[in-house]
Image: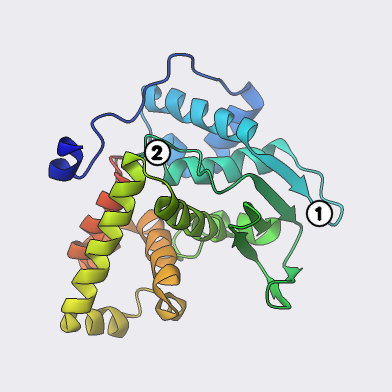
Amino acid sequence: MAYVVKRKKPFYIHFHLFKKTLNERQKSILRNQFTFYNRLSERHKRLFDHRVASFIKDKDFIGRQGIEVSDEMEVLISATAVMLTFGFRDFYIGLVSRIVIYPKAFYSNLNNEYHKGEFNPKMKTLVLSWEDFKEGYDISNDNLNLGIHEFTHAIHLNSKKEGDVSSIIFSTSFKELSLLLSQNEELRQELIASNYFRAYAYTNQSEFLAVIIETFIETPKQFKSEFPSIYVLVKQMLNFQIPGY
């Protein structure tokens, strides 16, 4: 813990005695549809494979309105969660047990409106519109990605509940970011005036976090150039040590 406090990162991340593997079809989905995967070294690809396979096994994937859950759905949704937690020691996101997939935007009983995605911590359920999830990756630089957005909500709430090293780093770094913005009015106004983060980011702290992580993943070079002090804290939050970030 002394190392964590000083360095703001875990002493180690990956320690898997027995690594799970993906089949060739699953690996092909990652290679052809998940750009992040192709940035990894061969060693990190094997670790990523293990985590995706483990995540798939750990979660219940449920199709709604006639959707049959496919390998593509399981792999791409799990890869999104694994990407965001690749710098974490514990990558399972314990507050997510079920992932429900609708073909399109769905009617939500939470507020009687149509949603593209939502996370229900009481039910440990993350719900996604497959059409909108896919669109998030079809357009890779618009800073709008449904899967990243909803998993960030889950990771955020999970970090408040859990006491593991990665959750502590995530929560502490977010507190540092919140303090920075609360004490630096000039930076806050610069953020708003730039229009770099979409207006929805300013709904509340939770939505701000989800939007800035979407932005961090999709346009890291621009983010680092325009708002370096915020970028550093987001990178610290995720413990992201990936080429290109």
Q: Give how far across and how far down residue 115 sits, in percent.
A: 67, 70
- Residue 5 in sight here: yes
As drawn, 174 above or below 205: above
38 to the left or right of 97? left
Residue drawn at point x = 69 percent, y = 59 percent? 131
Residue drawn at point x = 37 percent, y = 34 percent? 89
Q: Give how far across and how far down residue 172 sits, in percent.
A: 27, 55
For residue 86, the mark is 2
225 to the left or right of 13? left
Q: Secondary structure at mark 1?
A: loop
- Residue 221 in sight here: no
1 or 2: tag closer to the N-terminus = 1
Q: Give how far apart the Cα atoms at labels 1 and 2 are.
A: 29 Å
Where does label 1 land, which residue?
A: 64
Q: Nearer the viewer, residue 128 or 40?
A: 128
For residue 90, the mark is none
Q: Count neighbours of disc 1 (C-alpha within 10 A) and say few if under 14, some if 14 to 19, many if 20 or more.
A: some
Residue drawn at point x = 44 percent, y = 51 percent? 161
Tell me which amino acid carries mark 2.
Answer: Phe
Q: Give how far across and how far down residue 78 sits, in percent.
A: 57, 41
Q: Residue furthest top?
A: 18
As drawn, 72 above or below 230: above
Residue drawn at point x = 45 percent, y = 43 percent? 83
Q: Count neighbours of disc 2 (C-alpha within 10 A) and say few if under 14, some if 14 to 19, many if 20 or more.
A: many
